Each structure stands twice: as structure tokens, then as C-alpha cells.
Image: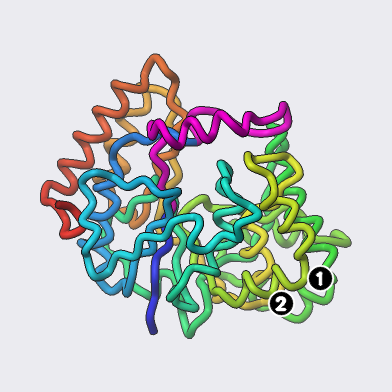
Amino acid sequence: MDIDIVVLWVDGEDEKWLKEKRKYSPSINEDNRARRYRSLDIFQYWFRGIEKYAPWIRKIHLVTEGHLPPWLNTSHPKLHIVRHSDFIPEKYLPTFSSHPIELNIHRIKDLSECFIYFNDDMFVINHVTLNDFFINLEPRDYALFSPITPSTNWYHILVNNIIALNRNFNFASTVKSHRSKWFSLRYGKLLLWNLLLTRRSGFSILRNGHLSIPFKKSTFMEVWDKEFNLLDQTCSNKFRNISDVSIWLMRYWRIAKGEFYPSKEIAGKYLNITNKNQIPEISHAITSKLKVLCLNDNISEDDYVVVENTLKKLLSNKFPLKSQFEL
């Protein structure tokens, strides 16, 4: 079957884009931190990883506001450049939040029914196969509860997703109908949380991996049909807002319907990078046997240049040759 990739990218230093962003200055309840938009200038290594380790991908849909990396080979036959205005309804534009972009990606022209969603900081660093993401047309996933503890206001977004899920599904019936998927032995020790939390009357926060996610377009269409007002409200926010829902709702929805193949998470790791002291850990992860690695930018201003240069060196050692996606 045809499998596509959707990846989001933004040039946080584009002057025209910055001017437009300042025009829509956010309120106190919105997330406008610079690290939401800055680029570590390592996106070329994302393409090198896909070309080397996932050559079976049919097409890469690169979603951007309009700007492009200067090194990008825009004529590559597998590359489809998608501007926000190409697929996001006009009434939601311009947007400076990833949520309206993510919630509308099913509208991208020529997107395959089964696709994998990436952020630009999620790198394929070893060979992956179609079966790492889909089995028998079902996304590989896990129905697992999380012992998450609220730490920031943005926790409310996860809660908003679960409220929508409980509004549309009866928890007890869902678990009973798909018992083998909620209590799969493939989950190992993590299954304990399900044994403890399935006695509740509704869905609790589900476990999120913050790695590449397999999706189906039909799920997005169904959620938009059932929860139009909720998604419309989120997409109307120019910046992230604590009233938002997120793309995780699409994942939760198919889990509630039992439309997934129960499996452990792909061999991957999420690294929340805050300072240069993490460089040894980053180096080890890049040279490990992991398949997907997320290098999330929460780097302090004092350490930013050092960490960025180190990341470039480490990824250059991992991927020394240019991909055909580069000029």
C-alpha cells in the first residue's frame, strides 16, 4: 500500500513571516515562545534519514507557510511542497499555531489514506519498514493509560482531548468491545496502568510517545464531522491556547474505536534538550540502534549556539552524504 509522510517546518527567522506574526500579537493565554518557531538548521539531516532508511515512502508532503530551506531540491519527484493556503480553510489563516495545521492535514491534495506524521525534529536514524507503522492497514499503536501529573497550563490541551473522547464514546463499552487491544500482552509492564485505571467510569489521559505517528485520513474526516465546533474553535486561535485540542485527539479517537494494531511503541526516544550537559546523552542516542529520535528544542539561550553546532556535527557524522532532496 502507498504510505506518505507529512512533515511540518517553519523558518522562524523569515522577516516577512515575523512581521505578520507581530501583527497578531497574542494574549496572555496563548503560547508565543520563540522556541516554538526557531530552527536548529538541521532539517537536511531529516531528509537524509528518510532517503537512507525509509526509501519505500511514496511521497513527502512538506508543509510550510511559504518559506523553504535554501538547500532544498524542490524538483525531487517524491517531494510535494504544501503551503498553508493550499489546504487550510482561509478563515483560519494566517496561523502561528501547529494545532490548526495538524488538524487539517487530511485536506492535503494527493495525500495517501495511510500516512505518517512527523515534526521536523523527529529523525529516522536506522532502517524502518512499513510494518513499523502499519499492519493490515491498521496503524500500530498502544491503548495505554498514563500516570501523567499536571505541570503546566498546557496540560489542559490533553484534558480537552479526553473530554471530547468521553463525550463521544462510552468507556466501559469501548474496553469490552476491544478487550484484546486494551489488555495486549505486547505492552509488557505498562499494561499495569490499564489494570489499575480501567475501573474508572471514563477515559483517563492516554500515554503519548511524542514520536512519529501513523494516521488515516478517514479518522480526521470523522472527527471533524462529529466535533466540528470544537475543532473550529481551536483552528480559529492564531496561537496555541489552553482551550485547544490537538492532533492527539485523532489518535485517541481511533484507539477508542479499536482501529489500531496493538503493539509496543516503535524503538525510539524523545529527548527534551535544555542545555549542553545533555550532549553525551544526545551523542549516544544518535549512534544507537533506535529507529526514531526526537530532538526537542528547549535549549537555554546561553547554551543554544554550542548545542546547535554539536548537533550539526553529530548528525553530519551520522549522515555524511547529501540526499537527493538537497541541491
Q: Residue at x 56, y 72 (%)?
A: 262
Q: Residue at x 37, y 27 (%)?
A: 278
- Which of the pair 200/84 is nearer the observer? 84
Q: Residue at x 51, y 50 (%)?
A: 210
Which kind of residue does numbered mark 1 sit on?
Phe
Residue 301 drawn at (x, y percent): 42, 18
Quadrant in the picture for residue 144: bottom right
Question: To which residue does mark 2 refer?
Answer: 179
Q: Is residue 220 left or right of residue 216?
A: right
Residue 302 drawn at (x, y percent): 39, 14
Q: Is residue 238 left or right of residue 51?
A: right
| Label 1 Cα neighbours within 10 Å, binned few <14 / some 14-19 / many ≥20 | some
Q: Residue at x 39, y 50 (%)?
A: 122
214 lies above or below 93 = below
Q: Nearer the viewer, mark 2 or mark 1?
A: 1
284 lies above or below 56 = above
Quadrant in the picture for residue 203: bottom right
Structural distance between the alpha carbons of marks 2 and 1: 15 Å
Residue 29 drawn at (x, y percent): 73, 31
Which kind of residue does numbered mark 2 sit on?
Arg
Task: Name the element at disc 1.
Answer: loop
Q: Which residues are magenta?
A: 8-36
Residue 281 highlighted magenta (yes or no): no
130 lies above or below 206 = below
Question: To which residue does mark 1 refer?
Answer: 169
Residue 195 appearing in the image: yes
Residue 199 appearing in the image: no
Q: Work out whether mark 2 precedes mark 1 in sequence or the reverse, and give the earlier one.
A: 1
Q: How many marks?
A: 2
